[in-house]
Amino acid sequence: MPNQNLISYLYCLVRDLYAENGDPRVAHLPLLGNIWIVLAIIGVYLAFVLHYGPKWMEHRDPFELKRVMQVYNVIQVVTNGIIFVIGLWNTYLRSDFSWTCQPVDHTDTSPHMMRVLYASYGYYMLKYLDLLDTVFIVLRKKNSQVSFLHVYHHGGMVFGVSIFMTFLGGSHCTLLGVINLLVHSVMYSYYYAASLGALQHILWWKQKITQLQLLQFGYLTFHFLLVILRNPCQFPVFIAFIGFIQNIFMFSMFFDFYYKTYVRKQRKTAESKLKTS
C-alpha cells in the first residue's frame, strides 16, 4: 500500500509539472507533454537491442542491409543539414539571440521563434530515427558494437530532447541541437561515403569525426558553465548544471573510446614496428 501511494504521488507530481510548466506553443505536437509514452518507447528500444533482438537473431543469418542503410544515411544527411541551416539562421545568426544567456520565454510567438521551435521538433523526431542505428547493428549481428556508450547516448538523447522540447524550446539549450545537427550531417556523410568504398584510403576521417564529437561536448560544457557563473537571463540553473555534468560525462566516455580506439592502438602499432625493424 505505501508503494502504491508513492507511485501515485510521483505520477501526479510529474503530471502537474508537465501541465503547469510545459510550453503551450508546442503542447499540441505528438510525443510532447506525456513523458510516459517517451519512456515506453525508450523501454521497447532497450528491450529489443539488449535482449529480444540478439536472442531473435541468435540462430539466423545476419541481414544484408547495405542498400537500406545507404538510403538511411542519405535521409540523415539531408534532414540534419536542412534543420541545421534553418535552426542556425533563426537563432545564432540573429542579433537578438544570445550565445551567452538565452532565456526560456514561452510567450515568444514571433515568426522566427516559431520556426526555431518547429525546427527543434524536427530535430527531436530525428532522435527517434537515430534509434535505428542500433536496430541495424542487431539485425546485422554486430552485437559487439552495442556498447554502453552507444545505447546510453541514443536512449538518453531521446529523453533529453523530449524534456528540452516540452519545457525549454528556444532557450540556452538550443545550441546543443544546432551543434549536434552539424556533427550528424558530417558523420552520416562519412558513413554513406564509406559504404560506397569512397573512403577506403582516407579512413582517418573516422578519427576526425570522434575528435569533432569531443569538441562538441567540450564546447557545450563551457556553454552551460556560462549561465552557472553568470545568469543575466534567469535561465534555470538546475538545468544548466545538469547540462554541464552531462556533457562532462559524455566527453569522458567519448575520450575513453577515442584513447582506446586510436591513441593506444597507434602506440601499439608504432611499438611493434620498432621491434620488427
Image (cartoon, rainbow, N blue to C red):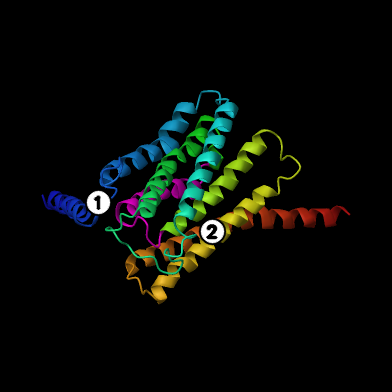
Residue at image point 30% right, 51% down: 166
**Which segment is the magenta one?**
146-173
Residue at image point 39% right, 38% down: 45
The secondary structure type at the circle numbered 2 is: helix
Q: What residue would you read off at disc 2?
A: 216
Q: Which quadrant: the C terminus?
A: bottom right
Query: Which residue is more in the foreground, 229 or 170?
Result: 170
Specify whether residue 149 is painted magenta. yes
Q: Residue 109: which quarter of the image?
A: bottom left
Residue at image point 46% right, 57% down: 176
Specify whether residue 209 is painted magenta. no
At label 1, the amino acid type is: Pro
Asked if residue 127 lies left or right of residue 254, the reply is left
Q: Give percent across and percent down for residue 36.
A: 26, 44
Residue at image point 54% right, 47% down: 184
Q: What residue would you read off at disc 1?
A: 24
Q: Give percent across and percent down for residue 131.
A: 45, 39
- Mark toward the start of the polypeptide (1 vs 2): 1
Q: Is residue 9 above or below residue 63?
A: below
Q: Give percent across and percent down for residue 211.
A: 62, 56
